[in-house]
Image (cartoon, rainbow, N blue to C red):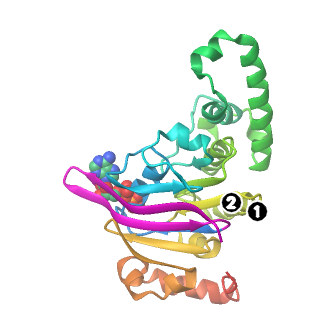
Amino acid sequence: MKTVLEIKNLTKRFEGLVAVKDVNITVKERQIHALIGPNGAGKTTTLSMINGTLEPTSGKILFGGQDITGMPAYKIAQKGLGRTFQNIKVFGSLTALENLMVGAMHNNNKGGVLRMLLCVKETNAMERTMREQALEVINEIGIYRLKDEYARNLPYGSQKVLELGRALMGKPKMILLDEPAAGLNTSERAEFVEILEKMYEKGIDLFLIEHNMDVVMNISHMITVLNFGQKIAEGTPSQIQSNPEVIRAYLGNRYKTIRKTEESRGNANAGR
Ligand SMILES: Nc1ncnc2c1ncn2[C@@H]1O[C@H](COP(=O)(O)OP(=O)(O)OP(=O)(O)O)[C@@H](O)[C@H]1O
Ligand SMILES: [Mg+2]
């Protein structure tokens, strides 16, 4: 299996605090890879270094074999690495469709904003292309009927889906997701997981941070566990569920709950 994303000895210091310490993760192609761990373990910090919103203190990040360490976020997005955020970042006063079009700006606007302003004809053509693409994406993520609603009026679950749609506008090879299911109710969560699976089947690789173990254990092929900035375990869902250090540091009693859920489903993960 080819490696898509490789994180080597990644470290991030904030003044006196080491948020991420010497972390190594290899993400293989066609694998849904999850990053889990307690609050403050360094998960978001790791994701931010991968997508270029934070500069690593040391270490290397390779995407598709290419060194992307310390590159600005927009360049990394252009290379096919999309991202969603832990706190929703949709623009409330834009419509759902316009939010998607904004998501495409980074990728399509090769000549910069000034060129766009100067060249009205080209801008119109670009806008048409973006609109067409946005309509395609909004259909794919199942919220076409909400396309003209202001984002601030959308239910929370649809805002989360919209954020995923924005990442899709960059035509990514891989999406980094920071707690995509947080705050969703059971049915919204099930819908979201379905969309993620659809994206994966379309050929997009997924790397996700998630606290909901039901989502993590059912969707992931591989899981990396962080604790106090360090990697403490890596493996398949069943390996992680039975790892004593992971149970002690993070899973606790939740592990038993998941096992029960899995058993009642006839152990759906068994073949993964
Ligand atoms: N910009 C920053 N400046 C200083 N400290 C920071 C900064 N960002 C994160 N930290 C600290 O780094 C540590 C790791 O934070 P991070 O947000 O990566 O954790 P996390 O695993 O995503 O947690 P959660 O599950 O709560 O989202 C925490 O102690 C946090 O307070
Ligand atoms: Mg976080």
Whether residue 151 is situated above or below residue 44 in the rendered picture: above
| Precedes in sequence: disc 2 or disc 1 | 2
Residue 7 within the segment the image draws in magenta? yes
Quarter occupied by the C terminus = bottom right
Q: Residues within 10 Å of mark 1 (few under 14, many from 20)?
A: few
Which of the 4 quarters of the picture holds residue 151? top right
Which residue is labeled 2 in the image? 196
Residue 12 point in image, percent of width and height: 32, 55
Q: Quadrant of ligand 1?
A: bottom left
Which residue ends up furthest to the left in the rendered image? 16
Mark 1: secondary structure: helix
Q: Give the magenta-colored segment's residue range.
A: 1-30
Whether residue 258 is situated above or below residue 96 in the rendered picture: below
Which of the 4 quarters of the picture holds residue 138? top right
Residue 233 point in image, percent of width and height: 43, 78
Name the foreground residue: 143 vs 245: 245
* Residue in view at x 41 percent, y 81 percent: 246
Which residue is labeled 1 in the image? 201
